[in-house]
Image (tube, helix red, strand yellow):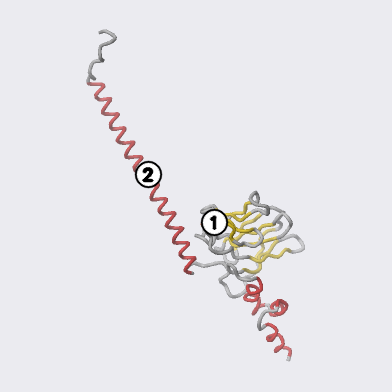
Amino acid sequence: MSLTEPPPPAAGPDRVGDDAADRLRDRISADSLTTRRDYLRIVATVSGGLAVGGLGVATGILHRHGDSEGLPPAKKVTDHLAPGESVAFRFPGDEDRALAVRLSDGSLVGYSAVCTHLACAVLWREDRGADGELYCPCHEGVFDARSGEVTAGPPPRPLPRIFLTEQSDGSVWAVATARAGEPTREALCRQFGKSRPETARALGCPGAERATGSRRT
Ligand code: FES
């Protein structure tokens, strides 16, 4: 056979090799189809879950931070919180995700860690912005670390506040909550009004003066 002659047609064993290659190709196609289908199903499930969660929050079906009228029991959050650090905890209920953050200037702030867009978990990012940021990775939602106000992304409301106190031993406690956008005094009066009349009076809560005065007379 000269070097220019075409190669002879494939014999039996090579044909078997071609069949195996075809079967392998079919298998790979089927596998990648399955993988793609599974991937799409996972994406649809996660997206559906988020949408349902967000709809639930939006329509009030699901529990929302600060929904309780009364004063929740105070809860110890941590023994100590250093500047720039954050700690995750649950408050006021066991299912209410929350974050306490010590800002670089020593201020202590607390928020619900449930994004007001579609209820993803909000994270503390010390490395973002001048004061650090509260960041939701689901759709790039950003909240101001000092106020909880929305500064970027799709969240429609600020993060609900959690009121924290610090004891002389450095321990941090959660004592009350606010609904998203609820003014501080209104939130505290709503919760302290009945159970702590003296505190409510000191805060100037509507009705507190009258209630305290009527007990005196
Ligand atoms: Fe969409 Fe947080 S869930 S930005």
Disc 2 element? helix
Which of the two discs, 1 and 2, sits closer to the camera? 1
Q: Is residue 11 left or right of residue 159?
A: left
Residue 55's disc is none
The answer to whether 27 is drawn above or below residue 37 in the figure is: above
Give percent across and percent down for residue 17. 28, 25
Tell whether circle 1 marks a residue whose Cβ is less than 8 angstroms from ligand 1: yes
- Along the line of sight, which residue is nearer the eye, 99 or 167? 99
Q: Residue at 54% of width from left, 63% of height from top?
A: 95
Give percent across and percent down for residue 139. 51, 54
Residue 153's disc is 1
Q: Is residue 44 left or right of residue 181?
A: left
**Which residue type carries mark 1?**
Gly
Give percent across and percent down for residue 168. 77, 63
- State how many labels appear: 2
Sequence-wise, the earlier of marks 1 and 2 is 2
